[in-house]
Each structure stands twice: as structure tokens, then as C-alpha cells.
Image (cartoon, helix red, strand yellow):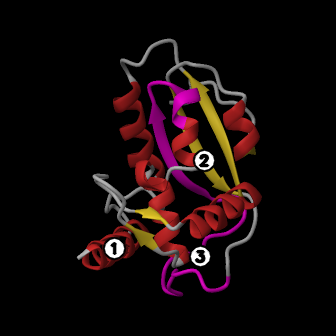
Amino acid sequence: MSELKWTATAPAKSAWQAMPFAPGLYKYYLSGGLPKDMNWPAELTPLKRGDLLYVGKATNLKGRAKHHDIQTSKSTFRRSLAALLGLQAQWHGRSAHPRLTDVDEEVLSVWMTQNLSVQFCVLPDAAPLADLEEAMRAELCPPLNRDGRTPEQVHVSEVAAAAHGKALREKG
């Protein structure tokens, strides 16, 4: 994976806007601070500025940007962050996942803009995407990927599942 060419780390919103319509990988980093009331137990490895949080893939980086920018129902990363931040999810229509209230969508988007940065690796074709992403996730164990390899990943999965269940119960 060392042969992959990554962009410089940049603020997430502007970096996504600069991406081409091409397949690639991306890595989210914590570039700011965490809210004091974030659901992150003291016994877990603390999250600090500069830490890798999440690794993802996209068959079209430009198209994937909107999922991380405004659509919590279509982004596992956003749903994980929302659950950890205690934001309120609710069901709308036939979506497979709840989305946040409009107010909480905005809160999350503002927080992400102020506190996250991203790096990209553009690939010539999408064929190796899944294998490359899986290899990176196995090697790096980003805490917000829900792979269950670390106590941090298990915690994120449990918090996200609880938030999902709560939204489902409230859907009634």
C-alpha cells in the first residue's frame, strides 16, 4: 500500500469539492477537537488531533462527497459520528437507515467542517478498490470503521446500533 499516491491532508469540505469523477480511497482524520460530552469511554484509546478515524472507498469520489457532506442516512461514517455525538436520528420514508433531524444534520455538518480533514488516493480503475480498502482497514484499524477488530471499533458499532434501534422504536 505504500505505492499508493495520497493527496496532502486538507479540510474535508474543500478537499471533497476538489475531487474528480474517479474511483479512489479516502481517509478521515481528526484535525480539531472532540466535544466534551462525546460518548467515548475513558478505558478506550483516546482520540486526539491528527488521529486517523475512518477509511473508505468510492467508485466515484465526486459522487461520494455528498454522502459525507449532508446525507447521514447514506454514510456509515456520519451515522457513527452522529451516534457518538448523541444526535437525534429519525426515520423518513423508505430509507434503510434513519437520518438526523434537520437541526442535528446541520450540527453534525458544521462539526465535521470544523474538525475533520481528509486525504485521497485516486485510482485508474475501480477493480482493486474493495481489496485495497479492506487491506488498509485491517492494517490501520481506524476506530470509526465498524470492523470489530479493536475495542474502539466494537464501541462505535454498539453505540451506532443502539441509536439505530432507538430510532426504529420511535418510528413505531
Camera-side residue of 98 and 29: 98
Residue closer to the observer: 105 or 94:
94
- Residue 52 lies in what quarter of the image? bottom right
| Mark 1 neighbour density, 10 Å: few (under 14) some (14–19) many (20 or more) | some
Q: Which of marks 2 and 3 is nearer the N terminus?
A: 3
Q: What element does badge 3 sit on?
A: loop
Q: Position of residue 35 (x, y in %)?
A: 67, 78
66 horizontally vs 170: left or right: right
Does residue 139 appear in the picture of this structure?
yes
User: Residue 167's mark?
Assistant: 1
Where residue 144 appears, as percent x and y from the top left, is 47, 60
- What secondary structure is the stretch in magenta mostly built from? loop
For image coordinates 31% across by 62% down, the residue present is: 148
The residue tagged with tag 1: helix, strand or loop?
helix
The answer to whether residue 39 is magenta is: yes
Of tags 1 and 3, the one toward the viewer is: 1
Q: Which label's residue is closer to the chain start, 1 or 2?
A: 2
Q: Residue furthest front?
A: 93
According to the image, label 3 marks what residue? 46
Name the front one of labels 1 and 2.
Answer: 1
Residue 152 drawn above or below residue 73: below
The residue beneath circle 2 is 69
Instruction: Tell me what residue is drawn at x 66 percent, y 26 percent.
Output: 19
**Would you say the residues marked 2 and 3 are in contact, meaning their CB atoms lie under 8 Å apart?**
no
How packed is label 3: few (under 14 Cα within 10 Å), some, or many (20 or more)? few
